[in-house]
Image (cartoon, rainbow, N blue to C red):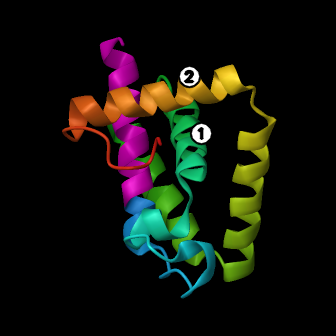
């Protein structure tokens, strides 16, 4: 993976982490049970991977300062979303993930696993 792609992956992971830190706590029960809160409680692994892909595309070619501003804007937007808007966002992420071919899904999973291994000391449950 090239340095620029790794940088974009880092930006995307930072955005995902930023959104998780400010997300509303997940409702108790249902599919959210057993998760650790934050992004693991708000979004499924597949939804997190789609957020990762979106961030990488959106920040391609940006300077570090531009990427930082973009992450801040995205975090602010997410924090201002209503529960209904968050549910719609999740449904959109799910639909887009389901529309990918198995090969595309495997490619995204591999990129996420490589990013985790390089930056976080291994897999943290999101790509499996």
Please provide percent x and percent y for residue 18.
38, 60
Mark 1 or mark 2, earlier in chain: 1
Q: Main secondary structure of the magenta part?
A: helix
Is residue 108 something that shows in the picture?
yes
Q: Report the residue at 36% width, 13% height from top.
A: 1
Count of marks overlaid on the render: 2
Secondary structure at badge 1 equals: helix
Q: Which residues are magenta?
A: 1-17
Tell whether 76 sits left or right of 17: right
Please provide percent x and percent y for residue 34.
44, 73
Q: Quadrant of residue 3?
A: top left
Badge 1 local density, few (<14 within 10 Å), some, or many (20+)?
few
Badge 2 local density, few (<14 within 10 Å), some, or many (20+)?
few
Residue that mark 1 sits on: 54
Relative to 24, say whether 119 is above or below.
above
Q: Nearer the viewer, residue 44 or 70?
A: 44
Relative to 85, say whether 12 is above or below.
above
Secondary structure at badge 2 equals: helix
The image's mark for residue 107 is: 2
* 28 in magenta: no
Q: Nearer the viewer, residue 63 or 100?
A: 100
* 13 in magenta: yes
Q: Report the residue at 40% width, 20% height from top.
A: 5
């Amino acid at each position: 993976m090239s340095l620029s792609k790794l940088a974009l992956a880092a930006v995307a992971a930072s955005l995902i982490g930023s959104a998780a830190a400010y997300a509303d706590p997940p409702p108790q029960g249902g599919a959210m049970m057993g998760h650790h809160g934050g992004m693991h409680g708000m979004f499924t692994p597949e939804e997190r991977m789609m957020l990762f892909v979106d961030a990488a595309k959106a920040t391609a070619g940006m300077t570090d300062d531009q990427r930082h501003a973009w992450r801040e804007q995205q975090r602010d937007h997410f924090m201002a979303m209503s529960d209904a808007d968050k549910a719609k966002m999740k449904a959109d992420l799910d639909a887009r993930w389901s529309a990918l071919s198995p090969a595309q899904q495997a490619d995204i999973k591999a990129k996420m696993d490589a990013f985790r291994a390089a930056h976080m000391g291994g897999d943290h449950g999101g790509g499996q």
